[in-house]
Image (cartoon, grey):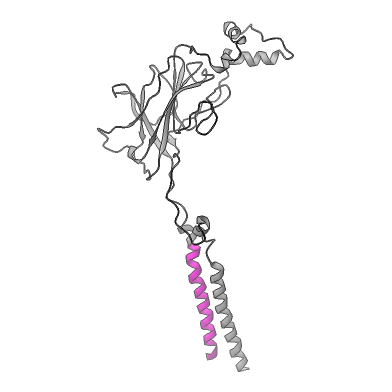
Amino acid sequence: MARSQPARFLATAAAAFLAATAAPLIGAGAAHAQEGGACASATVQYRLVDADGKVVGADWSSQGGFHQWDTVPGTVEVRLAPGQSVGEGCSYAVSLAEYTTEGPNWASSGHQEMIDKATVHLTAKDVAGRDDDGRTWQKLGVKAPSCFGQIDLYGEDTAYDGKEGEGHGPLPDVRAGVLTPYHLIAAWNGGDKRCESGTPESATPSPSAPETSASPAPSAPPAGSEPSAPAEDSSKPPVSPKPGATPSTDADVPPAQSSPPAPKSSPNGGNPPLAETGAGAPVGMLAGGAALVLAVGAGTVYASRARRS
């Protein structure tokens, strides 16, 4: 029995060695998961001010929806709502865009054309506090529409002007169901007259535009093989545009492109996911070492039994 003590000691030591080395690796997956450093969404507040900086209407608000203006909105001040923790390097683009439309509200807006756009970037310095007397806030201003128009406040830097390429997006169009801009915070519609400059849609079919505007019901499309289909397509937009869904609004906006801190170097050749989850750790080497210790112990046991026999 005394001769088997070294074998038992080696077996115990191997088990302890394997447990001690594997335990920290098993816990490494949760401990080093990438949780911090990413910028989260933030809530924006806004208010309208006149040329003298006096508040027009309600004070700071995150209320969304489409608003009908009595007078054209002037400057819009924006900030981040109080009580938020904004990380260093996090930035939030907020834009104000002005469009001409075909009607005074979203349902009758039809084709829209971007006229002006302004953008600011909110950071941790723009978070509201308890005592904000005397603080200045970032301002957004666009050209005031002189006819039917829409003004959008949204949480992006993208220009939804119908152009191609990076930084541009499709124009809003109720008839086509294009609900842009995305990340819409609030919008204002209004105006009391049609815009003088014709929209691309009304300018393209020059012969049919006067006919449909003068007498939409009795007018007939040019003769063709399928008279009924063109009649509906050409008369539906100006006569009774079928409104699509109203764009949703939300004061929570996503972060703009940011540069989070670079991940720390890892022993697996710069692959953070493998190193941080423990998948790239030398578990095979550790297990091999433990197996070697167990093999030595087994050999010792065998040798001790052979001597006794």
Q: Position of residue 164 (x, y in %)?
A: 55, 29
Q: Identify the residue shown where x is 36% and y is 21%.
A: 74
Can I make out residue 134 in this image?
Answer: yes
Q: Identify the residue shown where x is 50% and y is 63%.
A: 26
Vertical placement of 92 versus 241: above or below?
A: below
Furthest residue toward right: 225
Magenta stretch holds residue 13: yes
Q: Is residue 53 left or right of residue 204?
A: left
Q: Identify the residue shown where x is 54% and y is 32%.
A: 165
Q: Is residue 298 left or right of residue 91?
A: right
Can I make out residue 240 in this image?
Answer: no
Q: Identify the residue shown where x is 52% and y is 56%.
A: 271
Q: Position of residue 23 (x, y in %)?
A: 49, 67
Q: Which residues are magenta?
A: 1-27
Q: Nearer the viewer, residue 242 or 138?
A: 138
Q: Is residue 191 left or right of residue 130?
A: right
Q: Nearer the viewer, residue 250 or 231?
A: 231
Vertical placement of 223 versus 7: above or below?
A: above
Quadrant into which the C terminus falls: bottom right
Quadrant into which the N terminus falls: bottom right
Magenta stretch holds residue 103: no
Q: Is residue 284 left or right of residue 43?
A: right
Q: Position of residue 117 (x, y in %)?
A: 43, 26
Q: Nearer the viewer, residue 195 or 277?
A: 195
Magenta stretch mostly in which secondary structure? helix
Q: Position of residue 48 (x, y in %)?
A: 35, 25
Vertical placement of 106 versus 134: above or below?
A: above
Counting labels gives 0
